Amino acid sequence: MAITNEYLQRVYAQAEKRDGDQPEFLQAVREVFETLGPVVEANPQYEANGILERFIEPERAVKFRVCWVDDEGKVQVNRGYRIQFNSAIGPYKGGLRFHPTVTESVVKFLGFEQILKNSLTTLPMGGGKGGSDFDPKGKSDAEVMRFCQAFMTELQRHIGQFTDVPAGDINVGAREIGYLFGQYKRIRDEFTGVLTGKGLEWGGSLARTEATGYGLCYYTAEALDKLRGDSFEGKTVAISGSGNVAIFATEKAQALGAKVVTASDSNGYIYDPNGIQLDVVKDIKLGHRGRIKEYADRVPGSEYHEGFTGVWTVPCDIALPCATQNEIDEESAKTLVKNGCTVVCEGANMPSTPEAIAVYQANGVLYGPAKAANAGGVAVSGLEMSQNSYRLSWTFEETDEKLHDIMKDIVASSLEAAEKYGKKGDLMAGANIAGFIKVADSMVAQGAY
Ligand code: GLU
């Protein structure tokens, strides 16, 4: 696809010039700009107010040194980031990712996606993201704690319940949020909802752990119903990853009548033709932070293969990528289509390359883009913020029902926006347009700053 409008072309060229060394960020911007042509043409006030120029420039980007002492007494130095991208519709909101692949480009692409994703949830949250190149793999619990404390010692001066509310992302789960929250409280001497994904005993929300995976399935089920009159019932599903998103997507897909046959980690994938035994995956990954290979040793009839992209060679009706960015390239997309896959909905952020998306579009694949399909996680984070403000907690059922309604609403608003701007049935264009208009109108209303 191409960027069709002159204003968008000009702003994108400027981004390429300034941020030419940030491939993931440019990829995310390009994908959005390719769908916004009719929107900027119908709304000349956006160009007049420099909305797109402002939209791709973070309001604030913090980069800091994180210094911590390992178990051998040696000083380690990592890089920390917090990108406060856009606060037009609420305080900055978005997760923290700890992974050796984290760079400014990765955090900026994630923050950029988060602006539109958060807008789609209908909740008042701006876009932000952060993280570090720290690799928790192989680190002791005490090392992870010291790292988190060092990270928060700097981050705390930039965040707050009304300013910026971080949460988890890859490798940042309940354990890390606990250490981060403890350090914030220690330094600031205040107990506030400054982070989401907190433990249930200290301000967390029921259903937050399940939210991204469950939400992904609610979104997929709704899109299947609205666009094809179909459902998960009797479908074979390939899921990548074995973290929080993948585990609870598997749980909900199974509950909705599908057979999930795969799981993966950064080393390889497992294939279980009888359907994944989720209690075994949970025991390996949530129980003792093990490798997915162990599944094949424990479950007769299942297979383990090295190389995580091999998961897309497994025949399936529905693919739910829940691992990481750019995990499905053109070749994997072609293989999926050849093997009969007709639905790809994204649990991870930007898991499909632009070439893979072109393959989906050319072959009529029902494509649910990440910023819509995986918005359930941050949606329940938003509900956690509401509960913290009320100083009460809702039941699992109440929260899960709100999540379900939000995911259905995202499908509806995406389809409506797509139809209005001449892209009937296009969930990607619809998500970009619906998410963007709300933020852009708020920016116009609040004046240039
Ligand atoms: N990291 C998640 C995402 O990509 C959740 C962010 C949050 O809960 O703030 O949306």
Image (spheres, rainbow, N blue to C red):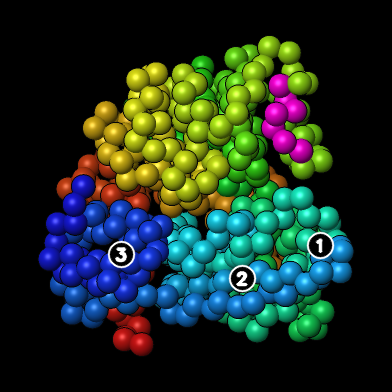
Instruction: Report the residue marked by disc 2.
Output: 79
One can see residue 165 in this view:
no
Dot 2 falls on a residue whose secondary structure is strand
Amino acid type of the residue tagged 2 in the rendering = Arg
Q: Earlier in the sequence, mark 1 or mark 3?
A: 1
Q: Residue at the spot x=83%, y=55% of the render?
A: 140
Q: Residue at the spot x=61%, y=65% of the render?
A: 132
Above/below status of 93 relative to 278: below
On the picture, is 93 further left or further right than 413? right
Instruction: Report the residue marked by disc 3.
Output: 437
Mark 3 neighbour density, 10 Å: few (under 14) some (14–19) many (20 or more): some
Q: Which residues lie in the magenta part?
A: 290-296
Residue 440 lies, in percent from the top left, at 31, 71
Give the quadrant of residue 441.
bottom left
For disc 2, does the CB lie below 8 Å from ligand 1?
no
| Distance CA(mark 2)–CA(mark 1) | 16 Å
Amino acid type of the residue tagged 3 in the rendering = Ile
Mark in the foreground, 1 or 3: 1
Dot 1 falls on a residue whose secondary structure is helix
Closest to the observer: 369 or 10? 10
Residue 233 lies, in percent from the top left, at 51, 20
| Tags 2 and 1 touching, CB below 8 Å | no
Q: Residue at the spot x=20%, y=61% of the render?
A: 39
On the picture, is 54 further left or further right than 403? left
Give the quadrant of residue 50.
bottom left
Closest to the observer: 65 or 360? 65
Q: Residue at the spot x=12%, y=66% of the render?
A: 6
Mark 2 neighbour density, 10 Å: few (under 14) some (14–19) many (20 or more): some
Residue 4 lies, in percent from the top left, at 14, 57
